[in-house]
Image (cartoon, helix red, strand yellow):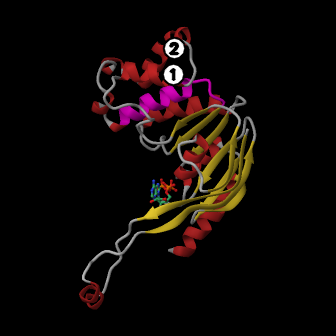
Amino acid sequence: MIEVEGVGIEFLRNRRYRLSLREMLLKGKSTTPKGTFWALRDISFKVGAGEAVGLVGANGQGKSTLLKIIAGVLMPDEGRVQVNAGVAPLIELTGGFVGDLTARENIWLTAGLHGLRKEQIEERFDDIVSFAEIGDFLDTPFRHFSSGMQVRLGFSVITTLDEPIILVDEVLAVGDKRFRAKCYDRIDQIVHTDRTLFLVSHSENDLKRFCSRGIYLDGGRMKVDGPVEEAIETYNEDQGRRK
Ligand SMILES: Nc1ncnc2c1ncn2[C@@H]1O[C@H](COP(=O)(O)OP(=O)(O)OP(=O)(O)O)[C@@H](O)[C@H]1O
């Protein structure tokens, strides 16, 4: 379903580094030229239908970047990615929704872009709205939604699509407790089908609950690809060592 081979992606680092007073006087400027860094390097794995993979790692280690590459939002600078099925990504909180469009318009747009026919959207529309609990705000522009409401709508739409691959990035942490419980039920349903799930989470419980396989990213490299418990354990050991 997903084949990633030797993937790497390089970003521009626009970091200002501290210059000594002497350097500043000599060079006469306070910033240095841009450099680049590899946010991901040498990443290779294959994922089949029905697998649930947890991505583990500290902040800034490349988890979201990897999801974006699988979603086709970013192109790798080296290596090859082959994704043989449609992808429903919930990567950024806004779910790719358009801020100026209303919730209603965004539902139609997103569902349409993911290949649902008019009758299918009509059929699922009320369920999407009631799961997201945004009934009173259907005709409000999306950008006026609170972050919690944005996540609710994003999650509701993305999980209602028929795409075989679902990418969920750190979304469960945003909703309130009651909504999270609904999300858990829904992810449970997804996990029990032959759909493929990628879950980025800092919650060990969530990762262990839904994922059997874990990929641990550290400094943009894949340090573990194995049982989710092993990925979490190695991550925790590294964190402990770095304290
Ligand atoms: N478009 C971009 N341009 C430049 N640098 C970027 C870009 N996107 C991400 N980065 C950098 O790449 C690195 C990996 O970012 P990424 O968002 O994938 O990390 P992450 O593991 O998902 O982190 P978090 O747990 O904080 O969400 C970080 O150093 C980030 O600042």
Q: Which residues are magenta?
A: 148-164
Quarter of the image for residue 14 reads: bottom left
Secondary structure predominantly adopted by residues drawn in magenta: helix
Q: Is residue 113 above or below residue 43?
A: above
156 inside magenta stretch: yes
213 left or right, relative to 147: right
Residue 7 on image: x %, y %: 66, 56
Q: Is mark 1 within 8 Å of ligand 1?
A: no
Quarter of the image with the N terminus is top right
- On the image, the x and y values in percent for residue 51 come to 72, 40
* Observer able to see residue 127: yes
Question: Residue 121, labelled with which disc?
Answer: 2
In terms of secondary structure, where does tag 1 sit? Answer: helix
Disc 1: which residue = 111
As rendered, which of 176 and 86 lies closer to the eye?
86
At label 1, the amino acid type is: Ala
At mark 2, the secondary structure is helix
Give me the residue at 54% from left, 8% from top: 119
Asked if the residues shown at circle 2 and circle 1 are in contact, with their CB atoms under 8 angstroms apart, the answer is yes
Residue at horizontal 26%, vertical 85%?
A: 24
| Residue 230 appears in the picture as rendered | no
Q: Image height check: is 113 above or below 147?
A: above
| Residue at 42% over, 42% down | 174
User: Measured along the vertical axis of the image, is residue 157 above or below residue 13?
Assistant: above
- Residue 84: give x, y in percent of width and height: 71, 35
Along the line of sight, which residue is nearer the eye, 13 or 102?
13
Earlier sequence position, callout 2 versus callout 1: 1
Mark 2 is surrounded, within 10 Å at the Cα level, by few (under 14), some (14 to 19) or many (20 or more) other residues, namely some
